[in-house]
Amino acid sequence: MFDEFRPELREVHNRVINKMMTKRLQAVGNSSGIIIDKPILELLRITSETELDISTDGERLIVTPIRSDDGRKRKLARAQERTLKTHERTFRKLAK
């Protein structure tokens, strides 16, 4: 689950996985926020610039970092090119 090349995070990983952490919401203007400890942010490679997907299963708050996947984008672009090349005539007819 965690990068074996980052042994300094092993202790944090074990603490997070093997022990529940308790946090309280803190007031942030008219809203509330959760302060996430730096070691956890480092473990999950989350920075202040990382976009987060926030969802719930009805009982839990689930926070997932959104990773830009350049490899996926390249694959999608290639698939689009192939599709356009293969079906160019059809698309031109539909565009009329």
Image: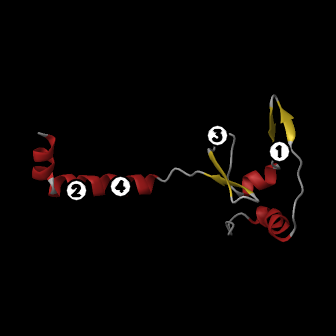
- What is the three-letter code of the residue carrying label 2? Thr
- What is the three-letter code of the residue carrying label 1? Ile
Q: N-terminal of the two: label 2 or label 1?
A: 1
Secondary structure under badge 3? loop
Which of label 3 and label 4 is nearer to you? 4
Foreground residue, 3 or 53?
53
Q: Which mark is residue 83?
A: 2
Q: N-terminal of the two: label 3 or label 4?
A: 3
**Disc 1 target residue:** 35
Q: N-terminal of the two: label 1 or label 4?
A: 1
Q: Which mark is residue 49?
A: 3
Q: CA distance from mark 1 to mark 4?
A: 36 Å
Foreground residue, 91 or 85?
91
Residue occupying image coordinates x 80% and y 48%:
36
Residue 36's place in the image compared with 44, above or below, is above
Image-based side of 22 in relation to 89, left or right: right
Counting from the top left corner in percent of width and height, residue 29 is at 81, 28
Q: CA distance from mark 2 to mark 1?
A: 46 Å
Q: Residues within 10 Å of mark 1 (few under 14, many from 20)?
A: few
